[in-house]
Image: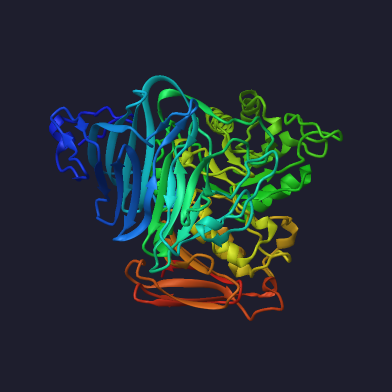
Amino acid sequence: MSEPDAYGSPGGLSRRGLLRGAAVTAGAAALGVGASGTADAADALVTATAPDGSTTITMSLTGGALSWAAARRGATVVDASALGLRLGDGTMLGRSGTVVTRYQHWTTDTTWTPVYGRNATVRDRYQEMRWNLQDSATGINFSVQIRAYPGGVAFRYVLLDHGTATVADELTTFVFPDGALVYSARDEDPYNPVAPDAIPSTGTSTTDTGPLTDLPLTATYATGGLIACVCESSRVGFPRLMLSSVPGQPGALAAYLMEHTARGADTVRTTSTVTTPFATPWRAVVTGSTHAELVDNAELVLSLAPATALADTSWIRPGKAFRCQLTTAGGMAGVDFAVARGMQYIEYDDGWYGDASHSTDATKPIPEIDLPSVLSYAAGKGIGVILYVDRRAAGSPDSLFDLYKGWGVAGVKLGFINDGTQAMTNQITNWVRTAAGHELLIDLHDDVRPFGYERTYPNWISLEGVRGNERFPTASHNVTLPFARNIGGPMDYTICYGQSRNRTTNAHQMAMAAVYYQPLAFLYWYDQPSKYAGTAGWPGLPWFDAVPTSWDQSRALAGSIGRYVAVARRKGNTWYLGAMTDESARTLSLPLSFLGSGTWTATVYADGTPGASPYQTPVAVSTRTVTSATALSVAMAPSGGQAVLLEPS
C-alpha cells in the first residue's frame, strides 16, 4: 500500500484502503468513517501500533480538544498530554471546537541506505494514523499525524489551507508518569537529572528565559529499565523546540518555540510565518525497554527526515581529522601525521585567516600559512583540508564556498552558530544546501541541535551542540551522552587521548571512538604530531589508526545512563567494541554472541593499575582468542574504559 503525501492526499490509496483494519475506538460518540473517508464525531480516539507490537501512540479528541499518549510494552512513556498550535492572531488550534473531517491509516515496511551511518541499511517500519481536522470557529483546516515505530513514536502538525499562516506557539505537552526524571541541559551545560517540574530557570535579558531545557531530552522511569529520549526531526522553516517545566503540573513539560537565538545575538522573533500547506517538525520520542536498546533505536530520528536531496554523494567521505598548528609547517606536518595514522583530514581552526586587526575576511590566510602549498601537498597525499570559519565571516556563503571549492578545500567547520529562531533555522539549512552545491562537507559548531537533516543533506557530516570533551568533563558526563545528545544525531566530540587535563583514563578516551556515533571524528586535540613520534608510551595509537567512523552494523551491549555503556560496531569483517564507566570501577560481562562462526582474535586495550589521577592510569594491551560463545569480562578502573578490536582468526 502506498503512502499518502506529506499533507494528507492519498498516494494511490483506494477508499477501501483508507478504511481497512482501522485501529479506531470511540469515546462519547462513535467515530463514523464513511466510504468518502470523512469522520463526524464529538469525541474519538485512534491508536497507531508499531508493526512488532512494541510501542503505541494514541490520539484523542475529547470535548473538541486534542491529546496524545504513548506506551512501550504496556508501560506508560507519556501520559495524556495536550496537542495544538497557537496562531499569531490568538487562534488555538486543537484546544476547543475541533472536529475530524477525514481519517487515514497505513503500515509501511521499507529499508533505505545511508551514505554513512551506524548501519549499512536502515529499516523504516511504522504504522501511521492521520486525522484531518477543522477548527469550527475559524474554519481553519489542519492535520495531526502520528506514527508508531518499533523504536519509538512521533507526531507532527500540518496546516492544510493554501496561503500563509503565522505560528506563535506550539501547545504540545509531554506529561511523564510519577517518579520520572529528565536529563536537563541547556546550551553546553552538563546534564542534570531532575523531576520534570524542577528544571532550573535560566537565561538572560537577551535570551529565552525560564525553566527551559534543550533537546534531545532523555527521561528515565521509576520502575523497570524503560527509557525515552525526546528529539525533533525534519525542522525546516521553523524555530527550534525547547521544553519547559509547567508550574503546578508535576510531571509535565510544555513545548517552547525559541524566540531568541541561543546566545541572544540576533533579532527576536516572537512568531513564524510559513507558506501553507506546511508541516511542522516531527516530535519524536525514541524509546527503549533497556538503556542499551535506546542507543540502538536512535535511527528513528533519521527515518523521519526526508530522503537525500543529492543525486551524487560519491564525494562525501566520513573519516578522522587532525587539527593543525596555524603555520605552513604545521599543515605539512599534519598531513604527514594524517597519512601515518590512517586519518582522512586535517583542519585549520580559528585564526587561520585575517590579520592583526582581527579581520573577518575568510578569503585571506594569515602570512604564516601558505595555504595553496598545504592544499597541494595534502591533495597529493589523499588528505582533505577542512577550514574553520566564524559564521560572521560567512555572510555570502555561495561566493565563499565557491572560492573554497576552487582552492580544493574538502569542508568547512562553521563556528559560533546561534541556533534557535526560524530565521536561524533557515540560515543553517541554507549553509548546508549551499555547501552541498559546492561539494563541501560542513560541520556546524557551538549551540546547534540535530534534527535529522544529515539524511537529506549528508554533506552535513557533524555538529556540536554538546559540552565538548575539550572542556575535560567528568566520566559521568561522558557516559550520559550516548543516551542523550547522541540519540538525536552525530556529535563532534573531540577525543583527547594522552591529555594531562583529562578527568578520565586513556582507555576511556579510546573507547569513545566506538561508543559515540561521530562520522567526522577529531582526534589528538591540543596536540602536535611530535608528541606521538614513534609509539613508545602510546600503546593506544594502533586502535585509533584502525577504527573507522562509519559502520556496517552497530549493537549496544550494555548501558545505564550516567553510569556505564558498551557498544560494538562492525566495519567489514572487524568489530570494534568500546566500554566506558563513570567514577566507579566496574566490570561488565559482555556476551560476544554477535560474532560470526569460528575463532576471533581480541586485542584488548584496558586500564592498567590505576594511577594517582585517572589520566595517569596506563593502557594495558593483551590478546586472547574468543568465539561467539565467549562472555568477555571487561574490567574498568574509576573513570575508565576498554577498547577491543575483534578480528577473525
For residue 20, side relative to residue 381 (left or right): left
The residue furthest top is 163
Placement of the N terminus among the 4 image quadrants: top left
**Which residue occupies 29% across, 30% down?**
8
Image: 592 above or below 403: below
In this view, the residue in front, 40 or 648, is 40
Q: Where is residue 550 drawn, in percent x and y?
A: 48, 51
**Which residue occupies 34% across, 50% down?**
69
The residue furthest bottom is 609
Look at the image and name its color scheme.
rainbow
The residue furthest right is 356
Q: Quadrant of the rendered structure where residue 387 is?
A: top right
Q: Where is residue 506 drawn, in percent x and y?
A: 63, 68
Residue 524 appearing in the image: no
* Numbered disc total: 0
Image: 152 above or below 181: above
Q: Where is residue 85 drawn, in percent x and y?
A: 43, 34
Q: Quadrant of the rendered structure where residue 610 is?
A: bottom right
In this view, the residue in front, 248 or 611, is 248
Q: Quadrant of the rendered structure where residue 228 is?
A: bottom left
**Which residue occupies 63% across, 37% down?**
261
Image: 344 above or below 507: above
Residue 250 appearing in the image: yes
Placement of the C terminus among the 4 image quadrants: bottom left
Q: Where is residue 549 drawn, in percent x and y?
A: 51, 52
In this view, the residue in front, 298 or 494, is 298
